[in-house]
Image: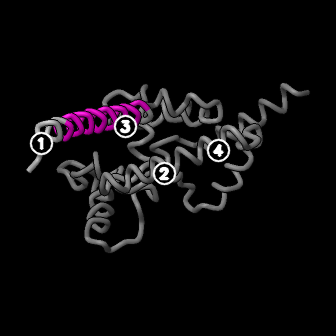
Amino acid sequence: MFSQHMKGNIILGLIIGIFVTLCFVFISVSAVVSTSKVKFCVSCHEMRPFYNTWKNGGHGTYKMGAIKAKCVDCHLPHKNITGYLVAKAMFGLNDFWAHNFKKTETLPLTWIKEWEGIKPKAHKGYESGCKECHKELIAPGIPIKAFTAHRAYLLGETNKTCISCHHMVGHGDILTYMRNKIREQKNKAL
């Protein structure tokens, strides 16, 4: 049916195809891993305020005993790998565009205006990120108020989210931090 020459070409084509596919997968996985690190996220100067407030927050680098969370742990959805990768690509392109083509010196004022309209003042995080680490919400020994709130949440008896109650956990009081930074910049200009 196939000549020896044709069989050799098919085998060579399959080997090359497998090699190219493996290279593509390796490069893609490496890119996802390297762009998921905090160091990568804060490589843009406009992300510095978020890094500074995160590192001192409940899941940052300086809290002893707390779960250390990376940016992608909270700011990307964790329901499935497809949603995660699509959101990562979309947000990455958005951040790339903002960093290279928008006036980033006005961002603190823009962020403050956006956040002041959110009640409670919550950042853009995903419930699936919280649930990824916090699987045991009604563990023995938690205060009765937390037990009651978590029970209502788990039973779907409330429309509150994790961030509704724990809005300071990721970045602390980011609004005050931003306002103070703007005030410092104004004082330097005088």
* Cα distance between the residues tagged 4 and 2: 28 Å
Q: Amino acid at mark 3?
A: Ser
Dot 1: element: loop
Residue numbers of the magenta segment: 9-34
Q: Amino acid at mark 1?
A: Ser
* Cα distance between the residues tagged 2 and 1: 69 Å
For residue 173, side relative to residue 188 (left or right): left
Q: Quadrant of residue 62?
A: top left
Q: Magenta segment, principal secondary structure?
A: helix
Q: Residue 143 or 59: which is nearer the viewer?
A: 59
Q: Is residue 158 above or below residue 117?
A: below
Q: Earlier in the sequence, mark 4 or mark 1?
A: 1
- The mark lying in front, picked from 3 and 1, is 1
Identify the residue shown where x is 11% and y is 37%: 4
* Cα distance between the residues tagged 2 and 3: 33 Å
Circles 2 and 1, Cβ within 8 Å, touching? The answer is no
Q: Earlier in the sequence, mark 2 or mark 3?
A: 3
Dot 2 corresponds to which residue? Answer: 167
| Magenta stretch: includes residue 41 | no
* Cα distance between the residues tagged 4 and 1: 53 Å
Q: Quadrant of residue 105?
A: top right
Dot 3: element: helix
Dot label at residue 97: 4
